Amino acid sequence: MESVSQKTWMHSFLYLTFIALSVYLLQTLISKNLIFSHEHVTVKKQPDLPLRFRSDGTFKILQVADMHYGNGILTRCRDVLASEFDNCTDLNTVRFLRRMIEAEKPDFIAFTGDNIFGSSTPDAAESLFGAFGPAMESGLPWAAVLGNHDQESTMTREELMSFISLMDYSVSQINPSADDTSDPGKEHLVSYIDGFGNYNLRVLGAPGSHLANSSILNLYFLDSGDRAVVEGVRTYGWIKESQLVWLRGVSQSFQVTHRQDQNQDNDQPSDTFSVQVTPPALAFFHIPIPEIRQGYFKEIIGQYQEYVACSSVHSGVLQTLVSMGDVKAVFIGHDHTNEFCGNLNDIWFCYGGGFGYHGYGRAGWPRRARVILAELVKGENAWMGVEKIKTWKRLDDEKLSKIDEQVLWDRQSSK
Ligand SMILES: *[C@@H]1O[C@H](CO)[C@@H](O)[C@H](O)[C@H]1NC(C)=O
Ligand SMILES: *[C@@H]1O[C@H](CO)[C@@H](O)[C@H](O)[C@H]1NC(C)=O
């Protein structure tokens, strides 16, 4: 009797323990996972890739510089007219971006840093969603680099680039990865590269053309850093030697692959275009280089209204770009009321002009954005390589006024 009741008790105890454990597991692990997967885990939406020219032979980029997004509707505008101030928040920045996308219908959006103004938001992730929201809604491929203010909230620069690379339709990358076999520059990868957000995006030729699988326009993104102290003096960040080594390597790899393409492709029409060795490239980063401050421009188009805020360190960016030969224009931000393009050694350096309403600006001087248009050469019966690169700006006024249209590069006149 004694032993039987003991056994039953034992069974009941084990049984109850089993039930309790199961309920606990269901409650905590499984249900949490279910809720987790339901609410938080979403697969990143991918844009139409690869990037390529349209069948009308064009590729259009919208450059957005210095959105300075803070905390959304709670963040007031700076440097607007008194009549605008009461109803002006980060949502004006959002509205301007939506209008630009709608008006220009770009193929790609490049954000050149100070996308968010870290110190004006308690949550970097939320601010990034606000700032890049219109780009994500549009479904267009977009990419960003960091400025000097992005990391002033709850994320480091590495975390920011990682997060940005995972946002919907983003083609941003943290840094070149050694296992990216699609990158022809992989053999040039350096083991350490300074900063976060150094990468190359290739834009392929028009569909159906013989360059449909070749990069005919390269977009180089570089991290120009934030701040630094050099010999006891505070200054801005700069592009480091490791980044320039990587960049030179990528640029050289395109000369090689392009020559190989031509050797393999013997029935290619032998017109003037096939002598081209390297596809043209555009570069994007945030902080101007010291050579812009020195300002020995051959030509300048647009407004030069403030002292160039750059690093005290000359790291030889201009010299590197000149020796590479493929970069025809560089797009920067940082100085919101400078919005000119200036030509240094046959490379154009173009400011985007302040875009965001929480960034400093000038009251009564509209926020603005830059558009870049690349056009292809028409061969005998199909599109070929890039013939011309143009740019202009649009103001956030009633008519989105278009100003300062100019040609940055033209294959004919560059010969
Ligand atoms: C305030 O701004 C929003 C958009 O930024 C606009 O839709 C609204 O009409 C404005 N209201 C007033 C009173 O100006
Ligand atoms: C490009 O690649 C596609 C798919 O691999 C192929 O069908 C096409 O023939 C290629 N076009 C050229 C011009 O090499």
Image: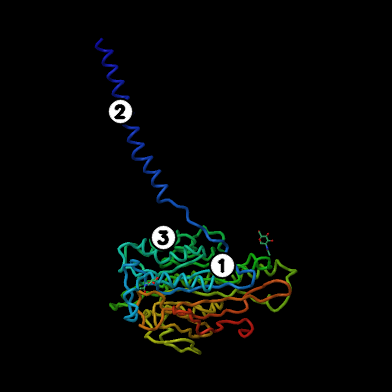
| Quarter of the figure that contains the C terminus | bottom right
Whichever of callouts 2 and 1 sits on the residue coming sooner in the sequence is 2
Query: Label 1: few (<14), some or many (≥20) within 10 Å?
Result: some
Q: Reply above or below: 15 against 360.
A: above
Who is closer to the viewer here, 151 or 254?
151
The dot on residue 341 is: none
Dot 2 amino acid type: Thr
Residue at image location 52% in from the left, 65% down from the top: 140
Measure the alpha-carbon separation of dots 2 and 3.
Answer: 43 Å
Horizontal side, residue 363 vs residue 320: left or right: left
| Quarter of the figure that contains the N terminus | top left
Query: Label 2: few (<14), some or many (≥20) within 10 Å?
Result: few
Whichever of callouts 1 and 3 sits on the residue coming sooner in the sequence is 3
Dot 3 amino acid type: Phe
Measured as percent of width and height from the top left, residue 400 is found at 48, 78
Measure the alpha-carbon separation of dots 1 and 3.
Answer: 22 Å
Who is closer to the viewer here, 61 or 83?
83
Pointer 2 residue = 17
Name the quadrant containing residue 70: bottom left
In the image, which is nearer the foreground, mark 2 or mark 1? Answer: 2
Residue sticking out furthest to the top = 1
The dot on residue 163 is: 3
Residue at image location 28% in from the left, 24% down from the top: 13
Q: Secondary structure at mark 3?
A: helix
Pointer 1 residue = 202
Measured as percent of width and height from the top left, residue 145 is found at 43, 69
Q: Reply above or below: 13 against 190.
A: above
